[in-house]
Amino acid sequence: AFPFQQHCDVLFENFVMPPRSECGEISRLVVRKTYRRRPGDNLAGVSRDLIESNVGIEPIQQSAVRERRSRNPQILLGLYREMYRYSVHNGIRYWYAAMERSLARALSSFNFVFTPIGLQTDYYGPVIPYIADLRELEARVSKASPELYAWIRGELGV
């Protein structure tokens, strides 16, 4: 069983789990507090104004990487980039993630859309279990932001 299943034991009745061999869990990511937080950021390093704005994000550019207070949450995107690359390399197509609603909302602003598969529960804090199909994520991100998609895939040499 995946770790989220020990904490999120009530899933929606119509949810069918994909083949275990194609799944991975990316829940409860941790970044050292002093490294991730800027004034106004949440625990994932996402700025409060980004979460509340529902505005799309500009493609990542070198100038944005150098600026300390960019609207692009570099740590969060970097983590997801590495998880994506690992997943593709290892045949993982589906991600389970038990996360806060605010993180799911922030990720959706990058077209990283996670679908809820259960009700909110306590898993080291209040979270909702989600699933993402990486093929759907690729299609969404590549269409909405080709530059971000290329960066995530490593095609920009960043």
Image: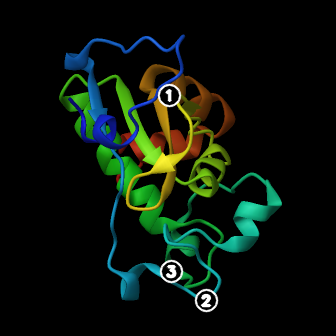
Dot 2 lies on which element? Answer: loop
Q: Quadrant of the C terminus?
A: bottom left
Tell me, yes or no, if residue 158 can be seen here.
no
Name the residue rendered at 18%, 28% in the picture.
90
Badge 2 density bin: few <14, some 14–19, many ≥20, Cα 10 Å: few
Please identify the quarter of the rendering in which residue 79 is found: bottom left
Residue drawn at x 56%, y 23% as measured from the top left? 139
For mark 2, what is the residue?
A: 39
- Tell me where residue 122 appears, x and y as whole percent: 45, 53
Q: Amino acid at mark 3?
A: Arg
Tell me the number on the disc at residue 66. 3
Given residues 120 and 27, the one toward you in this image is: 120
Where is residue 3, by image quadrant? Answer: top left
| Relative to 109, 82 lies left or right | left
Name the residue type under label 1. Glu
Q: CA distance from mark 3 to mark 2?
A: 17 Å
Judging depth in this view, the residue of 16 and 41 nearest the camera is 16
Q: Which residue is mark 1?
A: 138
Tell me the SS state at disc 1: helix
